[in-house]
Image (spheres, grey):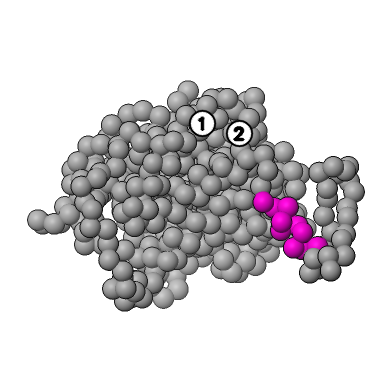
């Protein structure tokens, strides 16, 4: 009989394989399982054959044997595609487990599904953790950012493994920390992905602006300068590599079709913002930009209706563009953290935003120098617009954004996220908006009432307009 493993991984897809190797590398006795349905008959065998030198790993295709191989309380990390399949797996797993065992869902599950599964498992005496895991294949292998949500007691049971395999921050502390109850971990990962959508769209817009007058090498060289300062990030770093990648005599970027895909996590953030009554405008614009790109055939057809700008002499001021880029990134993070703050208040999660920024400072897709700054700033304030360091930067860079937007209009370029960032800032720093007319209209046709600026805010009025 093999010695009992301290940890189990269910699912050996790309992420499951990578995180299993990460766990095994850290010296933990590990059991891995994968189903043997059509197309996956040899997944476990192939994994074990490729990594047979790891004597601390056991492979299984029988679920009962997999569970029997684990020390109690059993700790099982599910690494499968989010959706109904997770419920099917739980239906198979839970009856085979014992009270106090821990299931961790490491996929991109929707936080409301996680909340439901958390309650279901709890009713059977099983601990359930919804853990957001960011970093892609490389991060899972070398050190991801991990965002676990569940009971603190269940987290303490698995913290040793999760914190050991996570990436270190600048001070050497692990980029894994307890987030809060039920679906909070997956909610935080969802917002992470919403911020990620915006960061990617902003770089796409920078690329569109630069490409009018700059070669790929010139763009890459300029972005290298940006990546040495406050704008530095993982996504900026990989964009530089993408710009330089060749296939034969061509740049690979020129051969890639301009239709962006999505897996839905960005739209989840936008929907959550709508449900919670928050203006996460940049996330929505980033999602819609991808949707628009998917209409390639129609775009080609309608492009014949217009002519591009013939004036190719003027080029964008790169200092303005860099400042506008940093301006938009601050607004993006403002909206993302405000979404988390509202969710924390609504669901009673008591989230620690300084800790969230810290565990996002390494290992994850949105890691950046800005996260290190926010880690310190969130110790004092929970709103970026209450942080002098952030508002001073926004005020200083407002002119740069206007110049970039004017240039985009002149060149007929759609700058979804730059414009959204600017108008959010304008609205949030405007004392009087035209919403009073909207209230009058609502009262006119629907008797919805309105408040007055010359009366108490707890009073509501209705007018017979005709």
Q: Does the magenta segment cover residue 309?
A: no
Q: Which segment is the magenta one?
A: 434-443
Position of residue 244 in the picture relative to residue 131 (left or right): left
Q: Where in the figure is residue 356, as x and y percent of width and height?
A: 58, 36
The image shows residue 161, relative to residue 449, as above or below, that is: above
Count neighbours of disc 1 (C-alpha within 10 A) and say few if under 14, some if 14 to 19, many if 20 or more: few
Our reading of the magenta stretch's main secondary structure is: helix
Q: Where in the figure is residue 290, as x and y percent of width and height?
A: 43, 62
Q: Classify mark 1: helix, strand or loop.
A: helix
Q: Where in the figure is residue 453, as x and y percent of width and height?
A: 81, 44
Rendered residue at 76%/63% (across/down): 442
Residue to which mark 1 is pinned: 395
On residue 283, the disc is none
The image shows residue 374, relative to residue 5, as above or below, that is: above
Q: Earlier in the sequence, mark 1 or mark 2?
A: 2
Q: Where in the figure is residue 330, as x and y percent of width and height?
A: 50, 37
The image shows residue 405, relative to residue 123, as above or below, that is: above
On residue 385, the disc is 2
């Amino acid at each position: 009989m093999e010695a009992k493993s301290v940890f189990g991984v269910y699912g050996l897809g790309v992420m499951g394989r990578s995180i299993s190797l990460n766990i095994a590398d850290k010296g933990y006795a590990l059991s891995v399982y994968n189903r043997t349905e059509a197309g996956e008959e040899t997944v476990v065998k192939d994994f074990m054959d490729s990594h047979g030198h790891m004597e601390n790993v056991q492979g299984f295709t029988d679920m009962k044997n997999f569970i029997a191989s684990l020390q109690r309380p059993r700790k099982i990390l599910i690494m499968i595609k989010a959706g109904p399949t997770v419920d099917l797996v739980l239906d198979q797993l839970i009856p085979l487990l014992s009270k106090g065992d821990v299931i961790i869902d490491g996929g991109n599950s929707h936080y409301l599904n996680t909340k439901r599964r958390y309650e279901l498992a709890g009713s059977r005496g099983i601990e359930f953790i919804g853990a957001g895991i960011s970093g892609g294949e490389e991060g899972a292998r070398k050190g991801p950012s991990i965002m676990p949500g569940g009971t603190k007691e269940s987290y303490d049971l698995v913290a040793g493994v999760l914190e050991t395999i996570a990436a270190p921050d600048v001070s050497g502390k692990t980029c894994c920390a307890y987030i809060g109850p039920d679906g909070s971990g997956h909610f935080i990962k969802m917002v992470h992905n919403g911020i990620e959508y915006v960061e990617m769209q902003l770089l796409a817009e920078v690329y569109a602006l630069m490409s009018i007058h700059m070669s790929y090498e010139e763009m890459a060289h300029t972005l290298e300068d940006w990546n040495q300062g406050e704008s530095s990030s993982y996504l900026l770093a990989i964009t530089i590599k993408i710009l330089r990648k060749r296939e034969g005599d061509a740049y690979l970027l020129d051969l890639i079709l301009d239709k962006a895909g999505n897996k839905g996590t960005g739209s989840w953030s936008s929907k959550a913002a709508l449900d919670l009554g928050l203006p996460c405008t940049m996330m929505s614009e980033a999602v819609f930009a991808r949707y628009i790109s998917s209409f390639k055939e129609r775009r080609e057809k309608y492009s014949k209706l217009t002519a591009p700008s013939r004036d190719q002499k003027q080029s964008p001021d790169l200092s303005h563009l860099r400042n506008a880029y940093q301006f938009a990134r601050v607004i993006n993070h403002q909206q993302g953290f405000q979404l988390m703050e509202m969710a924390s208040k609504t669901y009673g999660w008591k989230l620690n935003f300084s800790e969230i920024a810290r565990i996002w400072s390494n290992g994850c897709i949105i890691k950046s120098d800005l996260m290190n700054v926010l880690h310190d700033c969130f110790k004092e304030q929970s709103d970026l617009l209450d942080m002098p360091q952030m508002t001073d930067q926004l005020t200083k860079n407002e002119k740069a954004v206007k110049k970039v937007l004017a240039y985009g209009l002149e060149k007929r370029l759609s700058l979804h996220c730059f414009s959204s960032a600017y108008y959010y800032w304008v609205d949030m720093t405007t004392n009087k908006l035209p919403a009073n007319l909207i209230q009058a209209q609502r009262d006119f046709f629907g008797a919805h009432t309105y408040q007055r600026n010359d009366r108490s805010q707890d009073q509501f009025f209705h007018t017979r307009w005709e």
